[in-house]
């Protein structure tokens, strides 16, 4: 609870600094944009948080986001109705998680190694799907291609992103609503079902969990499937929100930012500890930080330094708390 209270206090300070930085920072359009970004990051933080909580790691999440965005666009361009393309893309993410999870727990490979390879493989597959070219909604909506898809795409934008044609402006933070729904569902699973208890037990001590009769491999494969499904879905949101996606950089570095959000929210990198409310608050930090940097006029080059230091400080604090807890028990 102290960690959650600390992140909440940090968010309050950052919002205060944002509002003081520029009068436009408190505008409705900017606050909606920030909230939408927090929802987008929240989905990925949830994916990374569940993985780390259960003692694993997934370095391919960002590449799966890019692959999902490109696949979603390519499917629609080739005549697949937008809602069907969305379902197929998320299903592809589920299969990716099943494949990687099976490699890790079927062949006893390290999750770090498997997902590091996946990071390159799925980025490469995204390039192969388009020949390295950008994919965009305008390619789908051209009159000579699939004009009948326009109403479906606009409906998805309104429902999942919060954009309403013809202005294409954000009018409400739909992505934050999507994340809130996901957080409620997975929060109930994490804190109120045997699945959550098993994930914590596995993350805390895999050998102890196995001796207790918990099917460790099955539950960890499930976290891979959930994580990759959420990442592929986030890729669809990315394309709907921005209208274009480049296979080279769509979703780039998002896996590290998602892990940062999870750690800030109190998910221990050693596994076994973490709460859904903590993940939600941790996910809100980086989008707010990016917005604050813009209004303060700080060069973009500084952002990776801040993210790296944030991850380090979060990990350092986590280690200090663990050692103090161990010392008290001892």
Image (tube, rainbow, N blue to C red):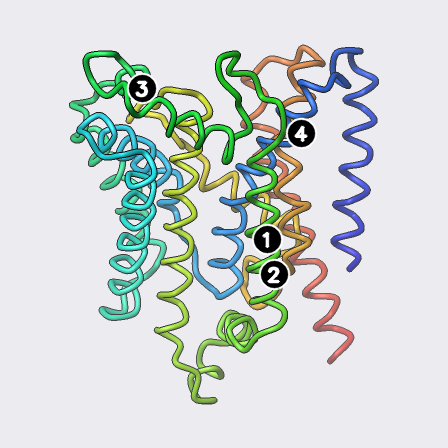
Who's the residue at 32% across and 54% down the image?
Answer: 94
> Does dot 4 land on a helix, a strand or a loop?
helix
Q: Are marks 1 and 2 in contact (CB under 8 Å)?
A: yes
Judge depth for marks 4 and 3 and give the one in front.
3
Who's the residue at 28% across and 57% down the image?
Answer: 100
In this rendering, the answer to whether 298 lies above or below 192 is above
Near mark 1 (Cα within 10 A), the count class, few <14, some 14-19 or many ≥20, is many
Q: Which mark is residue 288?
A: 4
Q: Are marks 3 and 2 in contact (CB under 8 Å)?
A: no
In this orientation, which residue lies closer to the viewer: 288 or 114?
288
Judging by the rendered image, the residue that carries numbered circle 1 is: 183
Judge depth for marks 4 and 2 and give the one in front.
2
Q: Which mark is residue 187?
A: 2
Quadrant in which the C terminus appears: bottom right
Quadrant in which the N terminus appears: bottom right
In this orientation, which residue lies closer to the viewer: 183 or 298?
183
Q: Are marks 3 and 1 in contact (CB under 8 Å)?
A: no
Q: Are marks 4 and 2 in contact (CB under 8 Å)?
A: no
Judging by the rendered image, the residue that carries numbered circle 3 is: 136
Whichever of callouts 4 and 1 sits on the residue coming sooner in the sequence is: 1
In this orientation, which residue lies closer to the viewer: 322 or 271?
271
Name the residue at the bottom extreme.
212
Who's the residue at 53% across and 23% down the image?
Answer: 163
Whichever of callouts 4 and 2 sits on the residue coming sooner in the sequence is: 2
Q: Which mark is residue 229?
A: none
Whichever of callouts 3 and 1 sits on the residue coming sooner in the sequence is: 3
Report the Cα–Cα distance between label 1 and label 2.
5 Å
Whichever of callouts 4 and 3 sits on the residue coming sooner in the sequence is: 3
């Amino acid at each position: 609870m102290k960690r959650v209270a600390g992140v909440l206090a940090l968010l309050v300070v950052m919002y205060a600094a944002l509002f003081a930085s520029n009068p436009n920072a408190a505008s409705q359009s900017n606050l909606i944009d920030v909230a939408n970004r927090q929802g987008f990051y929240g989905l990925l933080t949830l994916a990374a948080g569940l993985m780390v909580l259960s003692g694993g790691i997934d370095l391919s999440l960002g590449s799966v986001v890019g692959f999902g965005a490109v696949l979603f666009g390519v499917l629609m361009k080739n005549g697949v109705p937008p809602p069907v393309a969305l379902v197929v893309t998320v299903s592809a993410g589920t299969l990716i998680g099943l494949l990687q999870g099976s490699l890790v727990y079927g062949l006893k490979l390290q999750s770090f190694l498997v997902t590091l390879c996946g990071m390159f493989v799925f980025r490469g597959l995204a390039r192969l799907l388009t020949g390295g070219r950008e994919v965009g909604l305008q390619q789908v909506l051209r009159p000579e291609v699939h004009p009948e898809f326009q109403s479906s795409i606009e409906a998805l934008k309104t429902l999942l992103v919060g954009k309403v044609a013809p202005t294409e402006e954000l009018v409400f933070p739909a992505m934050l609503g999507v994340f809130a729904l996901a957080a409620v569902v997975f929060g109930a699973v994490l804190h109120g079902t045997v699945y959550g208890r098993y994930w914590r037990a596995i993350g805390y001590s895999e050998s102890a969990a196995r001796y207790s009769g918990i099917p460790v491999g099955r539950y960890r494969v499930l976290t891979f499937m959930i994580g990759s499904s959420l990442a592929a879905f986030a890729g669809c949101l990315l394309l709907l929100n921005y209208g274009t996606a480049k296979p080279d950089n769509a979703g780039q570095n998002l896996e590290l930012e998602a892990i940062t959000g999870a750690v800030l929210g109190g998910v221990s990198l050693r596994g076994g500890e973490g709460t859904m409310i903590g993940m939600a608050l941790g996910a809100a930090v980086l989008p707010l930080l990016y917005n604050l940097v813009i209004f303060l006029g700080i060069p973009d080059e500084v952002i990776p330094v801040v993210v790296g230091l944030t991850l380090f400080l979060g990990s350092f604090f986590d280690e200090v708390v663990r050692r103090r807890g161990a010392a008290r028990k001892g």
